[in-house]
Amino acid sequence: MLNLDNSTGIAFISENSPIRAQLRQYVQGQQMVMTQTAFNEFTNIVTSIAGALEQARSSRFLLRVTVIRDNPSARSLNLQTTRNLGENDIIILGTGDQLGIITMTADAKAVRAISGQGVDFSAYIHPPCRLTGN
């Protein structure tokens, strides 16, 4: 099982995503989950920015993803928000930690900020990708 954050979802659906094939290969044969918080962020971004092609790809993508409830680990709840680490980052990465699974993200700053507070989560960090509006 893999925990996907909203940045990973965007990389999967972005028109001309340079990393889509790499991400597909990584998730092949694994169950993909998204916390409720990540799902809400993802759908808000898709609704406001994505064009018709990206929205269609989003619909197909979400058929393969199971939305799970937010359930951050106890050690994540002790983290402090910073300029590079928001509350939603803590919830999303902390839920992956609680489940003992890898969280896929393009938010390397958040992962480094967590590590800077003495906590290491299992994360697969990939390059960011933006929606094109197509």
Image: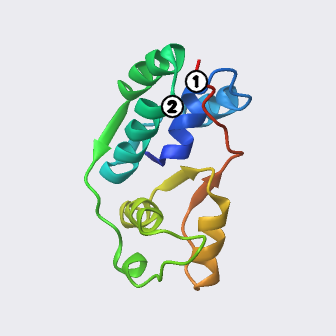
Q: How is the image coloured?
A: rainbow
The location of residue 70, given as percent across then percent down, is: 29, 58
38 left or right, relative to 84: left
Q: Residue at x 41, y 81 (%)?
A: 75
Q: Nearer the viewer, residue 18 or 75?
A: 18
Residue furthest toward the front? 48
The location of residue 134, given as percent across then percent down, is: 59, 17
Query: Between marks 2 and 1, how big is the CA–CA gap?
Result: 6 Å
| Badge 1 amino acid | Gly
92 left or right, relative to 24: left
The location of residue 117, given as percent across then percent down, is: 58, 85
Name the quadrant containing residue 111.
bottom right
Q: Nearer the viewer, residue 92 or 88?
A: 88
Name the quadrant containing residue 10.
top right
Looking at the rendering, in which quadrant would you find the N terminus?
top left
98 left or right, relative to 111: left
With respect to residue 69, does 22 lie above or below? above
Q: Residue at x 63, y 30 (%)?
A: 25
Residue 68 is labelled as none
List the residue tagged with mark 1: 133
**Secondary structure category for the residue under label 2:** helix
Q: Residue at x 74, y 29 (%)?
A: 18
Task: Tell me, yes or no, whether the two marked residues, 2 and 1, touch with CB atoms within 8 Å.
Answer: yes
- Alpha-carbon neighbours of circle 2 within 10 Å: few (<14), some, or many (≥20)? some
List the residue tagged with mark 2: 49
The location of residue 7, given as percent across then percent down, is: 55, 45
With respect to residue 117, does 23 lie above or below? above
| Badge 2 amino acid | Ile
With respect to residue 94, does 104 lie above or below? above
